[in-house]
Amino acid sequence: MLKYLYFFLAVIIIGCGANPIPRNATKKLTGAWVPVKQELGGNTIAKQFFSKQTLTIRDTTYSIAAENDVEDLQLDEGAIYINKNKIDIYGKKGKNKGKHITGIFKIEKNQLIICYNLGGIGFPESFETIGKPLYFMSTYEYKK
């Protein structure tokens, strides 16, 4: 009987510890962010390609929208999970539907910097994209 009790407690402890995503993990990222700088594989992306985009994070969801003259055009939506400085993104709607994207982030001088591995296998080890064609980095500022 005691053996079953230990097993049950072990399952509960392991199960609780296996969830690295506290409910408020995204609190410091919550809100709307606008990109101010982007690069892919070490190449700078011209501002005209992202100047009207907004990244919005709420709880464990994200959306990326681009404004145009007629209406807001939703580009991408999904789930975002954070464990320390690592991000797991699961696209549920839009161009990244069905994809798993990994990344790392940091906040410096009121800017959110995310380095994504668009291949979704492993996390970037640094905020560098040079020589890594599937690494995309975006610097965001909080939208006021």
Image (cartoon, rainbow, N blue to C red):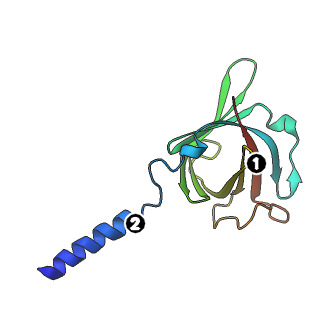
- Above or below residue 18? Residue 74 is above
Label 2: how many Cα within 10 Å (few below 14, some 14–19, many 20+): few
**Numbered marks: total:** 2
Camera-near label (2 vs 1) is 2
Outermost residue, bottom direction?
Answer: 3
User: Splitting the image into 4 quarters, where does residue 29 fall?
Assistant: top right
Residue displayed at 69% across by 54% down:
106
Q: Are marks 2 and 1 in contact (CB under 8 Å)?
A: no
Quick one: 141 or 76, which is closer to the camera?
Answer: 141
Mark 2 belongs to which amino acid? Gly
Q: Secondary structure at mark 1?
A: strand
Residue under label 1, please give it.
138
Residue under label 2, please give it.
17
4 left or right of 38 in image: left
Mark 1 belongs to which amino acid? Ser
Q: Earlier in the sequence, mark 2 or mark 1?
A: 2
Residue displayed at 76% across by 60% down:
127
- Res 92 seen here: no
Quick one: 1 or 93, which is closer to the camera?
Answer: 1
Residue displayed at 67% across by 61% down:
119
Residue 141: percent from the left, percent from the top?
74, 39
